[in-house]
Amino acid sequence: MEKRKKFMLQEADIPTQWYNITADMKNKPQPMLNPQTKEPLKAEDLYPLFAEELSRQEVNQTDAWIDIPEEVREKYKIYRPTPLVRATGLEKALDTPAHIYFKNESVSPVGSHKLNSALPQAYYNKMDGTTNITTETGAGQWGTALAFAAKTFGLELAVYMVKISYEQKPYRRSLMQTWGAQVIASPSMSTKAGRKIITDHPNYQGSLGTAISEAIELAMQTPNCKYTLGSVLNHVALHQTIIGLEAEKQMEMAGEYPDVVIGCFGGGSNFSGITFPFLRHNMLGKKNTRFVAAEPASCPKLTRGRFQYDFGDETGYTPLIPMFTLGHKFAPANIHAGGLRYHGAGSIVSQLLKDGLLEATAIKQLETFEAGVLFAQTEGIVPAPESTHAIAAAIREANQAKEEGKSKVILFNLSGHGLIDMSAYDQYLAGDLTNHEVTDEEISSILAQN
């Protein structure tokens, strides 16, 4: 077996700027709309909800490069640059001619890529004089990251955690509380949105859309408080591009360039982060790399959703976002990849998919856990249930290369480890997990309510 190779950068190699892909897009994403007036939103329209600089980043479609504040870059040095690894053990197990690389974002203090955006979001809120922030979290990775970031910059944080994940993943909750955050199972009785949902559906296990509604409501009603979001929005994708910018340098160190780049997909944060820096070379006509978003078959917004304006939350508090969506009332199945259980896709990814610059594939739960176990056995890292979707898609590509007898360079983002998700692996190994696919009738019914 070829010796396993890690490609490491130095602290000085941490990017000094994030990459704003919208500046290079021929077809810009459509603007978010005020749900009452249907008028495009300007940066100042977002100030009541988000930090001012984040609001400006959200609507910036002209500047390709945005400076990373030195205070944020210093905090990145806690864990960045992250390693790029050649997965030779996985290659051998698959007996494939493909070369498989993964960017290991699981080495962050919180165990996932989410800290890449949590740190700047906390920083910009602190610079605005904000004292309290709110957010939602699905599987808990974003809430955990923001809890650490909030403590780092001296902010108070309230996290609405999707109820099924609150129950399935108690140690995620414990991590958030260890870093000083208040964690509330969503839907809750602490907000008008939560009380209505509980009244209408007493046994409802929650969704990211519901948790977002509650977090926004609390932010709007609390003095000196702002809301933060861990995926979907343009400024989140911007911050995450630090992943792909580092990976570019590391692939150059490896002497190869990816034929396909893969990320798991919920709202688009880690997928955007690994793909956008490479995608810019395609848009400039210099490369012909494929980009694959791997989503759960139980929440297939990219592969079976509809492109339209929709709310980012269940109650309708957010602006209208142009997205591929299953409908903001969609209640996803209780799969263990809680971070991917979101009804819509970010506007940038949605536009790129609409223009044929990206691909999407839907993967069933059992295939993802099979891939995760194989990866753990060959590479020694137990991946998060979300990340197993990217691994499964990479394995498909490697097997295709074997069938065709062709070499292929595959890069995927290992968005996080699964050491706090072992109950999911317990259920898989015991044979208690099942596949779940949404019917066309269910999707049509929910979209008809929009």
Image: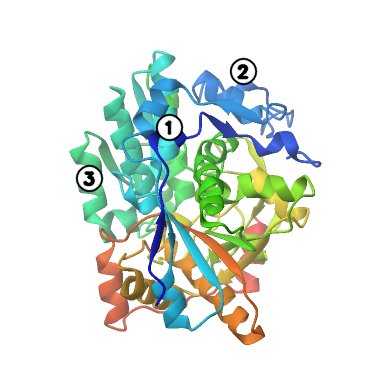
Could you tell me the amino acid type at mark 1?
Ala
Q: Can residue 267 be seen?
A: no
Report the front residue among 21 and 156: 21
Q: Quadrant of residue 179?
A: top left
In the rendered structure, the answer to whether residue 377 lies left or right of residue 257 reads left
Tell me if label 3 and label 1 are in contact, CB under 8 Å. no
Query: What residue do we see at 35% from left, 69% from top?
Result: 379
Residue 168 as seen in the image, left or right of residue 303: left
Across and down, in percent, residue 71 comes to 39, 21
Viewer-side label of 3, 1:
1
Residue 225: % across, % down:
39, 22
Residue at image coords 38%, 69% = 3
Position of the N terminus, as image quadrant, is bottom left
Q: Secondary structure at mark 1?
A: helix
Is 174 drawn above or below residue 64 in the view shown?
A: below
Mark 2 or 3: in front is 3
| Kind of residue sitting beneath label 2 | Glu
Compute the Cα span from label 2 to label 1. Answer: 35 Å
Q: Is residue 146 left or right of residue 304?
A: left
Front residue of 29 and 224: 29
Residue lying at the far top in this picture: please name it.
129
Mark with earlier residue (2, 3): 2
User: Looking at this view, is 359 or 397 the one in front?
Assistant: 397
The kind of residue tagged 3 is Leu
Report which residue position mark 1 lands on. Answer: 12
Q: Which residue is mark 2?
A: 44
Q: Which residue is mark 3?
A: 175
Q: Is residue 71 visible?
A: yes
The residue tagged with tag 2: helix, strand or loop? helix
The secondary element bearing badge 3 is classed as helix
